[in-house]
Amino acid sequence: MPKGPVHSEIEKRLNAELAPISLVVTNDSASHHGHAGDDGSGESHFSVEIECAAFAGQSRLNRQRMVNKALGDMMRDQVHAMVIKAKAPGE
């Protein structure tokens, strides 16, 4: 399945802001079709697995805040839900 514009923009922003060692963005929207937050675009629910040196020494909450900050207005305007698995190198 090709990546849509929201999926691609998530990857672009996270790569630019956090320079991750590894990044996997998964579009989970099909699993939520017809549920709350499904806007019909096919790009409303995502999972992110990210490993980043900037996360070293940060709490889980701070790591999630860093991801949300990197995504900025997307979290308000385009993404209904996101599961974030953020880890530092060696974890």
Image: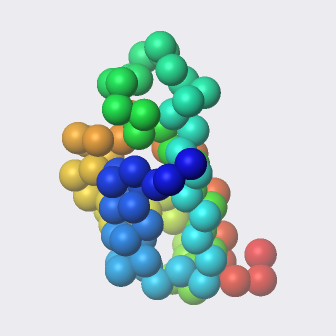
Depth check: give the residue in front, 8 or 88: 8
Task: Give the residue drawn at x 48%, y 15%.
Answer: 35
Left or right position of 73 against 29: left
Query: Residue 11, image x and y in percent?
Result: 43, 66
Depth check: give the residue in front, 8 or 48: 8
**Which residue appears farthest toward the front when viewing the image?**
1
Depth check: give the residue in front, 58 or 22: 22
Left or right position of 11 against 57: left
Check the image and report above or below for 49 versus 81: below
Task: Give the residue drawn at x 23%, y 41%.
Answer: 77
Query: Residue 46, image x and y in percent?
Result: 51, 45
Check the image and report above or below for 59 versus 15: above
Specify how the rendered protein is coloured. rainbow
Q: Quadrant of the C terminus?
A: bottom right
**Which residue appears farthest toward the right when viewing the image?**
90
Query: Residue 79, image x and y in percent?
Result: 36, 41
Number of disc labels: 0
Quarter assignment of residue 56:
bottom right
Residue 67 appears in the picture as rendered: yes
Query: Residue 2, image x and y in percent?
Result: 50, 53
Quarter assignment of residue 58:
bottom right
Check the image and report above or below for 73 versus 24: above
Task: Give the residue drawn at x 53%, y 80%.
Answer: 20
Residue 56 appears in the picture as rendered: no
Quarter assignment of residue 42:
top left
Task: Give the residue drawn at x 61%, y 64%.
Answer: 24
